[in-house]
Image (spheres, rainbow, N blue to C red):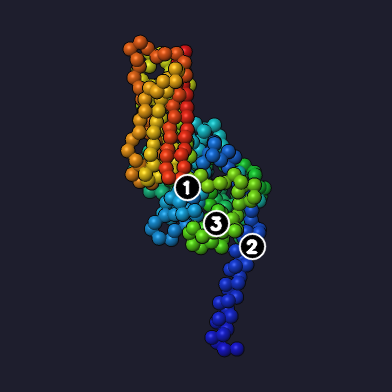
């Protein structure tokens, strides 16, 4: 056997082992949802792993719900109020706690003093639990709520066990669970599986269980919170607090504001907001310019002033409509005057 043939045989064997190993990952590790919420209703996937090796970013569908170098799946909660109510983080598969961190404060990264930010960047994942699995893969559960971790290092856990609760710790801008799958130092996208090496190619080996796959249908845009208030929201974080929405408008309120915060805003979207009064009369319609670029999250609002004769009693309804070439998406809310 020549030296050249030995090298070729070794290369072929290595390739075969890689493929076998990839199949083993899919066969040996099935992942259930790592969070106790209803996707598309009480939680949403805002970011996926970046599958584009260049400086551009693409998720596994070639969509833009990711950013350059992002390594995990971000299961976000609509508001901080949802976070405070408590949403459990669950073991996606049986495993052993390989490492953990707790005690990092829940707050927006931009609120940290400049002197503290380097340290927070260093522990970017915040409060974290890492599980090791029998096939050599690891799953990472990050940005957990401070002092919510319920497991200990080297503890064995079962699929579905509570590891902690969703938080806002570390390098983060919204309440969410960052879920990541690793093989050694390599990132595995659970939506694509270990065999997928190029973005946007079809994959038959996702790591998600059949039950999880039914709940994980790709949703390019979702409404996080839509509602009415007596005051104009100062910024995105005001809506994200979960404290803006009102069901009753005080009779002495000078304004009525309808607003919506959503993720997955796409270039050339046509957005329209309307307010309809108790007699089904259109009181306000607002249609800003076409959206100029893709954005992960965006919010709009429109308002009316109190009539000279006061607010007529009854229900006021608001609707936001997003029209794009592929779909029309609508969300609604109401507020009452008694």
At label 3, counting other C-alpha atoms closer than 10 Å, the crowd grade (few under 14, some 14-19, many 20 or more) is: many
Task: Say which of 12 and 204 sits in front.
Answer: 204
Query: Which part of the image, by quadrant, shows the N terminus?
Result: bottom right
Residue drawn at point x = 41 percent, y = 20 percent = 281
Query: Height in image: 301 above or below 189?
Result: above
Task: Say which of 183 and 216 sits in front.
Answer: 216
Residue beneath disc 1: 47
The local secondary structure at tag 3 comes to: loop
Locate residue 165, reporting x and y percent. Answer: 56, 39
Question: Gap between marks 1 and 3, in whole Å?
Answer: 14 Å
Locate residue 199, reporting x and y percent. Answer: 48, 59
Q: Which mark is residue 192?
A: 3
Residue drawn at point x = 50 percent, y = 54 percent = 60
Mark 2 vs 3, N-terminal side: 2
In this view, the residue farthest toward the bottom is 2
At label 2, counting other C-alpha atoms closer than 10 Å, the crowd grade (few under 14, some 14-19, many 20 or more) is: few
Mark 1 vs 3, N-terminal side: 1
Residue drawn at point x = 37 percent, y = 30 percent = 301
Question: Gap between marks 2 and 1, in whole Å?
Answer: 27 Å
Residue beneath disc 2: 24
Task: Say which of 32 and 202 sits in front.
Answer: 202
The local secondary structure at tag 1 comes to: strand
């Amino acid at each position: 056997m020549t030296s050249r043939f030995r090298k070729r045989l070794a290369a072929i064997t290595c390739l075969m082992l890689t493929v076998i190993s990839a199949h083993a990952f899919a066969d040996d590790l099935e992942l259930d949802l790592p969070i106790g919420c209803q996707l598309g209703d009480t939680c949403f996937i805002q970011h996926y792993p970046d599958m584009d090796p260049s400086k551009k970013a693409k998720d596994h569908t070639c969509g833009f719900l990711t950013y350059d170098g992002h390594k995990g799946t971000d299961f976000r909660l609509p508001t901080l109020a949802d976070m405070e109510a408590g949403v459990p983080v669950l073991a996606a598969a049986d495993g052993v706690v390989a490492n953990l961190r707790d005690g990092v404060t829940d707050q927006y990264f931009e609120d940290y003093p400049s002197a503290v930010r380097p340290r927070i960047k260093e522990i970017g994942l915040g409060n974290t639990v890492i599980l090791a699995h029998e096939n050599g893969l690891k799953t990472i559960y990050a940005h957990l709520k401070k002092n919510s971790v319920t497991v200990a290092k080297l503890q064995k856990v079962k699929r579905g066990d509570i590891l902690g609760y969703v938080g806002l710790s570390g390098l983060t801008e919204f309440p969410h669970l960052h879920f990541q799958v690793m093989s050694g130092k390599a990132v595995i996208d659970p939506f694509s599986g270990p065999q997928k090496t190029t973005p946007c190619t079809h994959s038959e080996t996702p790591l998600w269980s059949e039950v999880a796959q039914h709940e994980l249908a790709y949703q390019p845009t979702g409404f996080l919170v839509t509602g009415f208030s007596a005051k104009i929201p100062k910024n995105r974080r005001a809506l994200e607090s979960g404290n803006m929405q009102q069901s009753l408008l005080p009779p002495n309120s000078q304004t009525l504001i309808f607003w919506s915060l959503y993720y997955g805003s796409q270039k050339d979207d046509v957005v329209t907001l309307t307010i309809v009064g108790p007699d089904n009369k259109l009181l306000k319609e607002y249609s800003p310019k076409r959206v100029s670029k893709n954005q992960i999250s965006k919010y709009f609002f429109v308002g009316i002033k109190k009539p000279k004769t006061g607010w007529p009693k009854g229900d006021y309804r608001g609707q936001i409509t997003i029209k794009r070439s592929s779909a029309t998406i609508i969300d609604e809310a109401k507020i009452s005057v008694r």
